[in-house]
Every structure is written in C-alpha cells, then in structure tokens.
Image: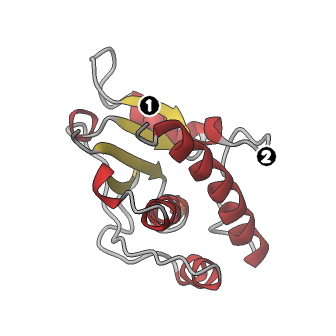
Amino acid sequence: MSPQRLLFVCLGNICRSPAAEGVFLHLVAREGLGDQFVVDSAGTGSWHVGKPADRRMLAAAEKRGIALPSRARQIEAADLGRFDRILTMDNDNLAAVQALAPGTEQALIEPITRHCRQFGSLEVPDPYYGGEDGFEQVLDLLEDACGGLLDRLRPR
Ligand code: 4NP
C-alpha cells in the first residue's frame, strides 16, 4: 500500500507544526510503521523560512525524547495536491489553508485537535510569545492528538 501523506500546519512552522511532525514521527517509529507514512510540516507565514524549530520547542521536545528535525517552509497551493491530509493547529491556520484552493477536490483539511481523546481543546495555542509552560501544553496536546490520529490511520 502506498504511504499516507500528512502535512502539519501552523503559522510560523517553528513551534507547533514541527512539534506535531516530530511527535507523529516518534510514535510511528516506535511502532515500526515508518514506511507507511510521509510526514512534513509548513507554516502559513514566511518569516522563519529555512530556520530550525524554536529552541524552546526543541528543548521541551528533547526532554520527552522527541527530535524535531524540520526546517521551516511556507505552505503553497500545490501542497493540497501532494498530501492526503492537512492538519492545522488553530482556526487561523485552518482558514488560511482552506483559502489556498477553495472548492477543489484535494487533501482533507482538518484541525489536529479533532483527534484528541484526552483534551477537549479546539485549538493548539500559539506558544511563541508566552512562557515555558506553553510549550509543555503544546506537547501534551500534540501527544494526545497524534496518538488519536495514528490510531485512526494505522493500517489494519
Ligand atoms: P508557530 O509559532 O506558528 O507555532 O510556529 C509562531 C512562531 C512565530 C511567530 C508566531 C507564531 N511569529 O510571530 O514570528
């Protein structure tokens, strides 16, 4: 079976979406499902293109044994044809991705929080201007959501 192609999207692609990518890859590797998924992340904004993940996000993830290998890039309309599923972090990201190609038959675009099983949050809050707690909260939410997502997509 061909791999499922997933794109995680936030605003800057240096905090939430690279963390989502890293958490999902971590879960997939733990289950030996690496060849079943192609995973990437992107931002709706372009300010941080080419940069690694924010050092605060990197440090928080590292404490949980999770690597964040990605470099920031900006999403483009062609991504809607390259990926099966696009998972957005908040309502602004969702609207921005939907606006890239209105009405065309392409990737399923949905909030990542739809896959949470433990938390009831509708958005993954932007941690950029806040304290360290915000980064932990983002990872808690993403571990929950990515676990639910993998359960949904795991080949049976
Ligand atoms: P992210 O966080 O969308 O989770 O990567 C942000 C990173 C940078 C900025 C905003 C949010 N910024 O304004 O530069």
**Residue 38: mark in rendering:** none
Cβ of mark 2 under 8 A from ligand 1: no
**Residue 109: mark in rendering:** 1
138 on left or right of 36: right
Residue at 37% from the left image edge and 47% from the top image edge = 7
Residue type highlighted by circle 2: Phe
Quadrant of the rendered structure where residue 58 is? Answer: bottom right
24 on left or right of 81: right
Give the SS element for disc 2.
loop
Q: Judge by depth and name the residue closer to the eye, 82 or 89.
A: 82
Residue at 64% from the left image edge and 79% from the top image edge = 64
From the image, state whether disc 2 or disc 1 is nearer to you.
Answer: 2
Q: Is residue 141 above or below residue 78?
A: below
Residue at 72% from the left image edge and 70% from the top image edge = 136
Q: Position of residue 15 (x, y in %)?
A: 53, 67
Circle 2 is placed at which residue position? 119
Q: Is residue 32 above or below residue 37?
A: below
Cβ of mark 1 under 8 A from ligand 1: no
